[in-house]
Image (cartoon, rainbow, N blue to C red):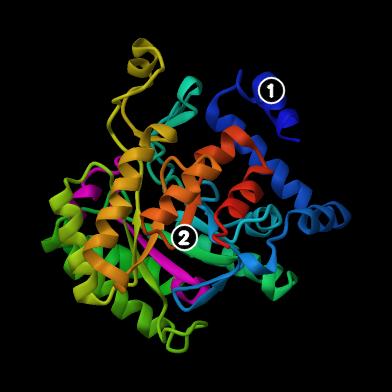
Amino acid sequence: MGFVYKLLFRTVFAPMSAERAHHIGFGAIKAFDRVPVAREAVGRALRPRPEESAEVLGLRFPNRFGLAAGFDKNADGVRGLARLGFGYIEVGTITGRAQPGNPAPRMFRFTRDRALVNRMGFNNVGADAAAVRLADQRRLLERIPAPVRPVVGVNIGKTKDVAGLEATIADYRHSTGLLAPLADYLVLNVSSPNTPGLRDLQAVESLRPLIQAVQETAAQAVPHPRNALGHVPLLVKIAPDLADADVVAVTELALELGVDGVVASNTTISREGLRTDAERVGAAGPGGLSGPPLAGRACDMVRLIRRTAGPGLTVIAAGGIETAADARARLAAGADLLQGYTGFIYHGPFWPRRIAAAAYPG
């Protein structure tokens, strides 16, 4: 089946724009989910095995491999994605207010590197509409047996035209209040390169009050969460372009404030080590690079966070996980959970099952 998808990718998807291909592919997943016989057959074929389950963040994950934020930005295709064997699905990034994102074209493939560059700019329907959609999806998920029902994370970010720390905190509070009741865990995204000023929030002096505000709002919104921790788990997603000293500083802050984990990492603004022709790289312009070129730095970050935090934080490894060897390397570096996105684009709907099997350490 992998060969069939590669042929489809090369002949159908590759000639069209990356964003259009994404809409068509995701649309097909959602359409497939509306055909009961088909979705049940695929669900049975790709469902996680019982021995792959893991207890992390006070939650039972059917397996350790999940879909990273960015694929289902508006939380409207979770059940369809759940049938493909992911142990968890992270929706978003969702902002306080709806926004169109940056002008197109804004997503590009570097096929020689099996990489993507995007400057989407958090295009999404906003927290109010996303909450309605996610509530609908959660009702649909209830029809999936609990042992194989994926965990659902929600990734929240800053609305582009919000300026100043006080207004930014209010923006995140709005999203948290609406989405925390629907989330198994929350991710505070302060690391996308495509929203002006967002990465400045990784500085400890800005990140501290932001984390505290989100924790307070989530506790008020969800007094009785569905997990063993007693609160909605909160993680912070950081950039691979941070210096090691800054990674350590964020990790230590997370420990101090009782944050539950770190996602390492987001996309990178670096273009080092690419095999793609320099002219093509330049023509794509700015944006975050994802895929295998990111793997080395992302793995190093996992190792650094684990060395700094010990067992005190959950580490979700993202960035360049494409093969079974990549999955095993992140687990060996100290990751508790794994995420992918770009590999899903290049390798198709049967790829998550292969990586999830590789992530089972038994």
Residue 185 among those drawn in magenta: yes
Q: Is residue 95 above or below residue 275?
A: below
Quadrant holding the N terminus: top right
- Horizontal side of 154 relative to 278 (left or right) equals right
**Amino acid on which disc 2 is placed:** Leu
Residue of label 1: 12
Rendered image quadrant of residue 14: top right
**Residue 192 visible in this rendered orientation of the protein:** no
Which residue does the image show at 15% across and 56% down from the upper left? 203
Secondary structure beneath dot 1 equals helix
- Horizontal side of 351 relative to 326 (left or right) equals right
- Residue 27: where, in percent of width, then height? 68, 42
Number of residue marks: 2
Image mark for residue 337: 2
Secondary structure beneath dot 2 equals strand
Query: Callout 1 environment at 10 Å: few (<14), some (14 to 19), or many (20+)?
Result: few
Image mark for residue 161: none
Q: Are marks 1 and 2 in contact (CB under 8 Å)?
A: no
Query: Callout 2 environment at 10 Å: few (<14), some (14 to 19), or many (20+)?
Result: many
Which residues lie in the magenta part?
Answer: 180-202
Residue situated furthest right in the rendering: 37
Which residue does the image show at 52% across and 39% down from the upper left? 322
Residue 21 among those drawn in magenta: no
- Residue 221: where, in percent of width, then height? 41, 81
